[in-house]
């Protein structure tokens, strides 16, 4: 992971390549300031050593991250696709539910499903419904997550996650095209995901 620190003097939108991460320090940001995604998809996670990079949310164009609600150690923003964001946005919904809170709630709900298979199925469904799109006979997710990251999201080991993903691939419900940074999922997999209707 390539970590970048934002200068307080940098102006205008900030562009980040896939895989780059920035640390947002709340002590350097004015109150009620927001970061807003203009292009791309980002993963927001906690930089605290105790939580080992716990994922809090995924952001897409139009989503905002209120910097005054962060923990004292800040938050990291990782580019999952080429990312463009601005850090001087005005909050659209000050004091209300924001995308980070909403994602954290959804990820917590997934973690409370009984079986690892259910949790993986629910996570894939959620990611595609929120961040993907239907493309012919497949639903495309425009980025890939490493098996270790998926394991963190569903509360299991990387080995178990790899085994579960292999089963889904063998059932021809998931494809990872070579030379492309995307996943393709069968609509039937997405539609039948636990928690899909809530």
Image (cartoon, rainbow, N blue to C red):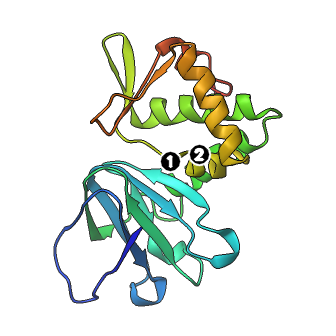
Most distant residue in the right direction = 114
Above/below status of 28 relative to 153: below
Q: Which of 175 and 101 lies nearest the eye of the viewer? A: 175
Residue at point 19% right, 68% down? 13
Residue at point 63% right, 22% down? 167
Q: Label 1: which residue? A: 146
Dot label at residue 133: none
In the image, 72: left or right of 20?
right
Q: Quadrant of residue 7?
A: bottom left
Residue at point 20% right, 83% down? 10
- Where does the C terminus fall, quadrant-wise? top right
Look at discs 1 and 2 and give the one toward the viewer: 1
Residue 162 in view: yes
Instruction: List x then y, in percent, for residue 22.
Output: 37, 73
Q: Are marks 1 and 2 in contact (CB under 8 Å)?
A: yes
Q: Residues within 10 Å of mark 2 (few under 14, many from 20)?
A: many
Report how far apart the C-alphas of labels 1 and 2 lie in the structure: 6 Å
Residue at point 36% right, 48% down? 60
Residue 98 in view: no
Instruction: List x then y, in percent, for residue 92.
Output: 38, 58
Q: Which of 196 and 143 lies nearest the eye of the viewer? A: 143
Q: Residues within 10 Å of mark 1 (few under 14, many from 20)?
A: few
SS of the residue at dot 1? Answer: loop
SS of the residue at dot 2? Answer: helix
Instruction: List x then y, in percent, for residue 131.
Output: 41, 37
Q: Label 2: which residue? A: 150
């Amino acid at each position: 992971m390539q970590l970048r620190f934002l200068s307080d003097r940098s102006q205008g939108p900030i562009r980040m390549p896939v895989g780059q991460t920035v640390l947002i320090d709340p002590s350097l940001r004015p109150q009620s300031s927001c970061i807003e995604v203009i292009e791309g998809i980002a993963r927001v996670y906690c930089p605290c050593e105790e939580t080992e990079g716990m994922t809090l949310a995924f952001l897409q164009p139009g989503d905002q991250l209120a910097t005054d609600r962060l923990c004292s150690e800040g938050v990291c923003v990782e580019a999952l696709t080429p990312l463009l964001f601005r850090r001087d946005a005005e909050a659209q919904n000050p004091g209300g539910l924001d995308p980070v809170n909403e994602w954290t709630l959804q990820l917590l709900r997934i973690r409370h499903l009984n079986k690892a298979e259910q949790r993986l199925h629910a996570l894939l469904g959620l990611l595609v419904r929120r961040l993907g799109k239907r493309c012919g006979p497949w639903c495309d997710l425009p980025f890939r997550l490493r098996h270790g990251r998926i394991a963190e999201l569903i509360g299991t080991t990387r080995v178990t996650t790899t085994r579960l993903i292999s089963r889904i691939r063998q059932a021809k419900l998931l494809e990872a095209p070579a030379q492309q940074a995307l996943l393709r999922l069968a609509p039937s997999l997405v539609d039948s995901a636990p928690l899909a209707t809530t």
